[in-house]
């Protein structure tokens, strides 16, 4: 037993996982599986073992290996043409998405790919996007071989239907260019304006005039190029009959420029070009900060990212590989084990065990026999099956569900930030002040009207509001992302703050989706029998068997005779002399009995021993989280599962919350619509495709991901499962956003009042404008960052 | 006075050079991935990584 324990704590040299009972010892090192050993050998042969020095146990576990012909579709000319970025006579460029990239070792190994095969010319990794740009010589190595090569060292490329005929989106760099240009012009104009601020000798006035002209030239790129963002946004919103914050800003920029040109040409003053370019620079900086996107995350996934590129079609006994869109009605297609079913169909060969958790949230796989209908989106768990397609991919149940709410997308989410509404009031106030000033100077000294009114419009630009908003948003997005909560854009912050009804999905959101929570009821199991059970359970790929095997803890191992598995029913076999059978009641006892399917019955030598009861494993701190959220939210749970967990769930989240079971994807969507009638704003938290409709329908949809490799349906935000307990604090942080923006705005408004005081008197000196502008911008920055960071510290996020 | 004009020309052209350098670096994709270059820098180059693929060869998709 002592030896056993030592053995169990051995970690694989390659992947760092515990080796368990069977340690593979080779090259003075321990490996958990032959896959890991093989990768080590490949690296050792080519002298790439530095891989292990860069970070410890950096390898990717290779226990689950890909099917050998998995990438056979990459031999098809048409698919190659759709996937590659560039190809000429000698080389091909391809970008692979490799979700397993996770550390610096990965980067190093992949960039040394050319050492593994001399036909690979280069490989460059983009870590943020988890992509590798591979250039290879296609006369020496095929695309399929390249994919197999990366797979062989543990980086299996993920190629989905989505990759075909969709242009690669390029990162938008235009804002960064604009920021650079604005910064350049701003700094130079500022330098050239120093004589204006400090005064200049009478004799050198000609020099001053030259400086002014140069400033004018330098301000042209700011006006014509760097500010174009604001023009476009203002024009768009005006066309829709809405006055957004950019409109008064554009007005103010144009008036500042116009007045400056007038002053310089008539030699009456220096204008305010420094202030104008400065404010454009700061506003652009805020926008760049706010719009920083998470390249590795995708908020726009639709069903095509889940489906494979190609499937095996069987025609007159011959297997051919075709792309998904080529599948027509009445085709027979072959689905391999662990593959997703791409279209609705009837099983014509083989027994299927299908995991629909993806589609409807049921946590247990269902058994389907020949002649039964299977739906797209299910994952085949057992061996290969053949299906006859009865509905094309675009017509399947799942796809239709997706398209149904596609149309809605345009109609909704046209909500405006409070900032725009506030800026509107602000604009009206400014206009009235301008009007009053006009009337005043009309009576006193009409020659000063022009001066006074333009000064007001320059000073009263709501750029302080815009600045504080973009900087606070950017900072909050960054803070949340550091805690594993990634928002799609800044508008989502307000959406989260406004939600008053939170809806959870059960499977995969509140629960972990694993079945580690096992209770055994029945006669006591001697330790030898227990390890035999584990050994038998290990033979099956069924998730419940895996958990049993883990629970019973495999021992020394042993030979299994007469192993038999009936998919979806049970398994039996002779282990070390014990005839063990496990499975449904019907399978074990032969009687038909309606029981809950979350039990596995056990019989030894034909005698009933007991049963394993599986309970959903809830994530940590769910009751605490719900208690916190309940203070100012309504809570509901929508579950695709049966109501077996009802009691436990209502204990956990409280009897006053709505809990609905057996909710299909369509039901969830309808339920959200119902709730929206009674709530101000509904937030849905879910995972998987079955929640996709509801996530879109809700005002805010948050998808929960186990880790960053998991594919999440399109949503407004992605939440790391481990950070779920912090959700209440995240919401508080989002609510704080508005207060910080308002505080910063009030402070900047005070600067405006000082400026206005000078302006209405018709004597705004450039030096005062030049001092006020940066002061107000900097105090806004300090307030925005300071307050939001302080709040984050207090909330411990 | 002519000295100031001369200095002015010099200073603005130096600044423009930096602006051009900045634009070049953005165009070159140096701001696209801010995680891998710091890691790549620390690797021992037993033999240098072969040439980095040209970013400009992107196949226009119809």
Image: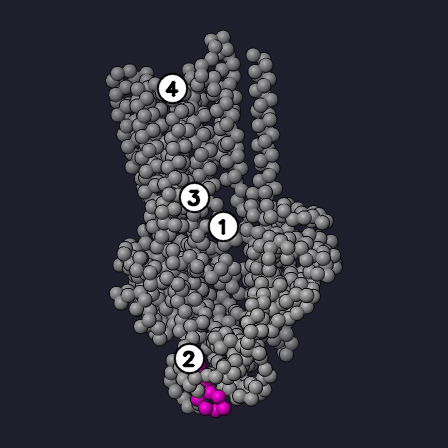
Above or below residue A783? Residue A718 is: below
- Marks 3 & 2 on one chain: yes
Q: Same chain for marks 4 and 3?
A: yes
Q: Which mark is residue A474?
A: 3
Q: Distance of mark 4 from mark 3, alpha carbons?
A: 34 Å
Residue, disc 2: A520
Q: Is the Cβ of the residue at disc 3 closer than 8 Å to that at disc 1?
A: no
Task: State the residue at coordinates (58%, 71%).
Answer: A7
Would residue A777 be found to the left or right of residue A369 on screen? left
Q: Is there CB contact under 8 Å for labels 2 and 4?
A: no
Mark 3 — on which chain does it sit? A
| Residue at point 42%, 50% (across, down) | A480
User: Which quadrant would the N terminus of chain A be assigned to in this image?
Assistant: bottom right
Callout 1: chain: A
Which numbered disc covers residue A765? Answer: 4
Determine crowd level at label 4: few under 14, some 14-19, many 20+ residues with C-alpha closer than 10 A.
some
Reply yes or no: does residue A158 show up in magenta: no
Q: Are marks 4 and 1 on the same chain?
A: yes
Give the secondary structure at mark 4: loop
Q: Earlier in the sequence, mark 4 or mark 1?
A: 1
Provide the residue span drawn in magenta. Answer: A598-608
Q: Which residue in the protein does label 1 denote?
A: A294
Seen in the picture, residue A400 relative to A785 is either above or below; the reply is: below
Task: Measure how far apart labels 3 and 2 are at the Cα level.
Answer: 51 Å
In the image: residue A152, left or right of residue A668? right
């Amino acid at each position: 037993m002592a030896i056993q324990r030592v053995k169990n704590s051995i970690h694989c040299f390659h992947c760092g996982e515990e080796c368990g009972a069977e340690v593979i010892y080779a090259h003075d090192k321990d490996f958990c599986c032959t896959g890991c050993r093989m990768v080590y050998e490949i690296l050792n042969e080519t002298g790439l073992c530095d891989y292990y020095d860069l970070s410890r146990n950096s390898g990717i576990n290779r226990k689950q290996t890909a099917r050998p012909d998995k990438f056979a579709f990459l031999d098809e000319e048409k698919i190659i043409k759709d996937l590659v970025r560039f190809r000429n006579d000698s080389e091909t460029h391809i970008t692979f998405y490799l979700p397993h990239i996770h550390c610096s070792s990965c980067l190093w190994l992949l960039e040394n790919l050319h050492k593994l095969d001399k036909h690979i010319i280069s490989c460059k990794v983009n870590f943020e996007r988890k992509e590798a740009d591979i250039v290879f010589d296609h006369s020496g190595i095929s695309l399929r071989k390249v994919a197999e090569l990366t797979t062989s060292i543990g980086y299996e490329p993920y190629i989905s239907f989505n990759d075909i005929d969709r242009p690669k989106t390029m990162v938008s760099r235009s804002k960064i260019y604009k920021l650079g240009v604005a910064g350049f012009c701003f700094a130079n104009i500022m330098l050239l304006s120093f004589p204006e601020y400090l005064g200049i000798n009478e004799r050198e006035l000609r020099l001053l005039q030259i400086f002014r002209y140069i400033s004018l030239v330098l301000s042209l790129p700011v006006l014509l190029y760097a500010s174009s963002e604001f023009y476009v946004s203002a024009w768009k919103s005006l066309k829709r009959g809405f006055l957004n914050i950019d409109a008064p800003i554009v007005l103010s920029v144009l008036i500042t420029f116009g007045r400056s040109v007038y002053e310089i040409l008539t030699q009456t003053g220096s204008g305010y070009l420094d202030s104008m370019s400065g404010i454009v620079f700061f506003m652009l900086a805020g926008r760049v900060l706010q719009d920083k996107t998470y390249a590795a995350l995708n908020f726009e996934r639709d069903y095509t990212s889940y489906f494979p590129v190609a499937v095996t079609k069987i025609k007159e006994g011959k297997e051919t590989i075709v792309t998904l869109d080529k599948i027509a009605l009445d085709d027979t297609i072959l689905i391999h084990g662990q593959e997703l079913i791409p279209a609705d169909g009837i099983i014509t060969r083989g027994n299927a065990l299908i995991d629909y958790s993806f589609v409807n949230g049921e946590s247990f796989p269902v058994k389907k026999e020949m002649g039964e209908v299977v739906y797209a989106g299910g994952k085949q768990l057992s061996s290969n099956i053949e299906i006859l397609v009865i509905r094309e991919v675009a017509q399947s149940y799942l796809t239709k569900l997706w398209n149904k709410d596609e149309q809605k997308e345009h109609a909704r989410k046209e909500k405006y930030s409070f900032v725009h509404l506030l800026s509107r009031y602000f604009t009206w106030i400014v206009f009235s002040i301008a009007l009053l000033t006009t009337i005043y100077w009309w009576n006193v000294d009409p020659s000063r009207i022009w001066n006074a009114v333009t000064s007001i419009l320059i000073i009263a630009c709501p750029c302080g509001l815009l600045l504080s908003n973009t900087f606070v948003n950017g900072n909050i997005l960054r803070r949340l992302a550091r805690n594993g909560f990634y928002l799609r854009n800044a508008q989502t912050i307000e959406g989260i703050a406004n939600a008053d009804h939170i809806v959870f999905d059960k499977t995969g959101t509140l629960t972990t989706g694993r079945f580690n929570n096992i209770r055994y009821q029945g006669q006591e199991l001697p330790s030898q029998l227990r390890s035999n059970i584990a050994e038998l359970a290990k033979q099956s790929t069924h998730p419940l068997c895996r958990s049993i095997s883990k629970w019973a803890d495999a021992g020394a191992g042993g030979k299994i005779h007469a192993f038999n598995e009936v998919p979806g029913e049970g398994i039996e076999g002779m282990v070390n002399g014990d005839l063990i059978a496990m499975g449904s009641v019907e399978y074990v006892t032969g009687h038909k009995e309606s029981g809950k399917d979350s039990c596995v019955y056990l019989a030894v030598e034909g005698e009933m021993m007991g049963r394993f009861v599986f309970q959903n494993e809830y994530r940590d701190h769910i009751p605490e989280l719900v208690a916190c959220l309940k203070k100012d939210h309504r809570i509901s749970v929508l579950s695709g599962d049966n109501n077996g967990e009802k009691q436990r769930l209502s204990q956990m989240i409280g009897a006053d919350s709505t809990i609905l079971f057996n909710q299909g994807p369509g039901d969830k969507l309808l339920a959200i619509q119902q709730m929206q009638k009674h709530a101000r704003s509904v937030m849905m938290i879910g995972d998987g495709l079955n929640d996709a409709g509801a996530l879109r329908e809700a005002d805010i949809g948050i998808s929960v991901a186990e880790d960053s490799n998991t594919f999440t349906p399109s949503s407004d935000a992605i939440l790391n499962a481990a950070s779920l307990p912090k959700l209440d604090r995240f919401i508080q942080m989002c609510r704080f956003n508005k207060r910080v923006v308002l505080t910063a705005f009030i402070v900047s408004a005070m600067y405006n009042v000082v400026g206005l005081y000078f302006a209405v008197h018709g004597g705004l000196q450039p030096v005062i404008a030049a001092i006020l502008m940066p002061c107000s911008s900097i105090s806004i920055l300090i307030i925005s960052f300071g307050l939001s960071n302080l709040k984050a510290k207090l909330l411990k996020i | 006075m002519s000295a100031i004009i001369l200095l002015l020309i010099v200073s603005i052209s130096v600044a423009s050079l930096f602006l051009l350098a900045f634009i070049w670096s953005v165009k070159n994709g140096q701001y696209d991935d801010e995680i891998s270059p710091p890691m790549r820098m620390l690797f021992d180059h037993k033999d240098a990584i072969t040439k980095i693929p040209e970013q400009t060869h992107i196949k226009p998709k119809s």
